[in-house]
Amino acid sequence: MKFSVQFILLFILFITFSAITFAQQVSDSSIKINTAPVANSLDYITKLQPISYEYNRGRYKQLNLPAGKHFGFIAHDAKLIVPSAVSNRHSWYTAGKGSQRTITTSEVDLDKLVPLLVGAIKEQQAQIEELKIEVEQFKRSK
């Protein structure tokens, strides 16, 4: 009995080690092609209109929407500025005995806006640095 428990533990350890050893790890830089810096991130960000909102839970009970105040964007408006950040979500719900229906809604994937936000911050920081230099030059010229 003792031998079989040890054998099973050893076997589990071997399988676990094998799975870890033979798992293929690929760098994200090797799977991404045609990479280029994003230019004019600040232009994209300044065109977006953030909003606060609450879901219409009374009219769309079947979607089980979360309560409370939320922050985000109107997907239709965001799609005009950053189309790649907007996708459709299909929600299935029961619409009677044995009947399923779907509602399609557009939503903004906030994760896809993060690179634009980082780019915009960097652009603003460059502008701030330029203004600092101009202020220093102005102070010296007085």
Image: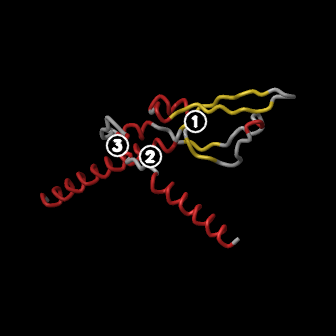
Which mark sits nearer the N-terminus, 1 or 2? 1
Q: Residue drawn at (67%, 43%), measured in percent from left and top?
A: 54
Disc 3: CA contacts within 10 A as few (<14), some (14-19) or many (>=20): few
Q: Residue at label 3? A: 30
The amino acid on which the numbered mark 2 sits, given as a three-letter code, is Val
Cα separation, mark 1 vs mark 2, equals 16 Å
Q: Residue at label 1? A: 107
Which mark sits nearer the N-terminus, 1 or 3? 3
The circle drawn on residue 114 is 2
Secondary-structure class at tag 3: helix
Q: Name the quadrant containing residue 46.
A: top left
Q: Residue drawn at (31%, 47%), measured in percent from left and top?
A: 123
Q: How many labels does the image show?
A: 3
Disc 1: CA contacts within 10 A as few (<14), some (14-19) or many (>=20): some
The circle drawn on residue 49 is none
Cα separation, mark 1 vs mark 3, equals 30 Å
Direction from residue 106 to residue 111 in the image, left or right = left
Q: Residue drawn at (60%, 44%), measured in percent from left and top?
A: 52
Kindly give the residue lying farthest to the bottom in the view shown: 2
